[in-house]
Amino acid sequence: MKIISMIPARYSASRFPGKLMQDLNGKTVILRTYEATKATGLFDDVFVVTDSEIIFKEIVNNGGKAIMSKKTHECGSDRIAEAVEFMDVDIVVNVQGDEPFTEVESLKKLIEVFKEDNDKQIDLASLMVHITDDDEINNPNTVKVIVDNNQLALYFSRSPIPFPRATDVGAKYYKHKGVYAFRKEALLDFYRLPMMPLEASEKIECIRYLEYGKRIKMVETNVQGVEIDTPEDLERAKKLWK
C-alpha cells in the first residue's frame, strides 16, 4: 500500500485567526506539525494542503512539500480530496495542522487497521481518547464519539453522548481526535456527495461518512496532546513543548 499524509491548513480560523502561523517555541505551529508528521517515518510522502500563500511559503521555504488548494472548501476532507484525486495512493492520513504533538504510536495504530483489513471492510480509521472531566464532556468544542462492540463509530456529537440519564451503568466518554486515515475511494466519495442534515447541524465532517453508510473504525489512544484552538491552548502548548 502507498500511504501518504496530508495536513489541511486554513489561515483563517474562526476562534483563533492565523493560529497556524503563531510561534511555538521558535517555529510556527504548522511547521512543527509538518516536521512531527514527517519525523514519524510512516509515510511515503507528507504534504501540507492550504488555501493560504503565507502557509504555502512557510512550508516550502523550510524545505517541505505544500499544495495550494484551487477551490474554497467547507472542510479539511474536501481540501485533501481535491489534492489527492489524481495521485496514485491507497491510504491518506489526515493530520490536523493545529496538532503539533501528533506522535508515531497513534498513527501506527491507524495504519495497522488497513493492513489487517484484508476484505476492505473499513473505509476510515480515526482516533479517540477516554475522557472523564465533566467540563470537557460537556464542552461543545470537544467532539464526542460512541462506538459498537467492534469499535465501529455509531455517532459523533458536540453534545455529551451517551446522555447520562443513568449515571451508575459504567458508560464511558470518548473524545474524537481529528486524525483520520482514509481509503482514497472513501475520501473521493465524501468529496462528491452533498452535505446532509446531521453533518450540517453538528458541523462535524465525519458524520457525512456515517450518513452515507461508511464504516469508521475507532482506535483508542492515551495520548491527549494539545489541539491549538485558542490563544490559551497555544500557551499550554509552549509549556508542554519545553
Image: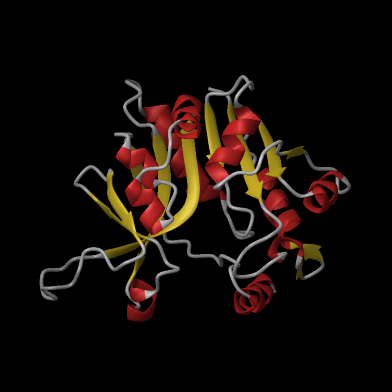
Residue 122, placed above or below residue 154: above
Apparent side of residue 64 relative to residue 193 in the rendered image (left or right): right
Q: Report which quarter residue 211 is drawn in.
A: top left
Residue found 72% across the figure and 46% down from its top: 51
Mark yes or no: residue 42 visible.
no
Residue 220, placed above or below residue 111: below
Q: Report which quarter residue 240 is drawn in.
A: bottom right
| In-front residue for pair 34/193 | 193
Residue found 32% across the figure and 41% down from its top: 210
Residue 168, placed above or below residue 129: below
Q: Position of residue 235 (x, y in %)?
A: 66, 78
Apparent side of residue 219 relative to residue 168 in the rendered image (left or right): right
**Quadrant housing the C terminus:** bottom right
Apparent side of residue 77 relative to residue 211 in the rendered image (left or right): right
Q: Position of residue 22 (x, y in %)?
A: 75, 67
Q: Position of residue 109 (x, y in %)?
A: 44, 43
| In-front residue for pair 154/33 | 154
For the image shown, how many numbered marks are present on the structure?
A: 0
Q: Position of residue 167 (x, y in %)?
A: 14, 76
Mark yes or no: residue 222 visible.
yes
| Color style of the picture | secondary structure
Q: Report which quarter residue 173 is drawn in.
A: bottom left
- The single residue placed furthest to the right in the displayed view is 61
Residue found 32% across the figure and 74% down from its top: 132
Residue 177, placed above or below residue 94: below
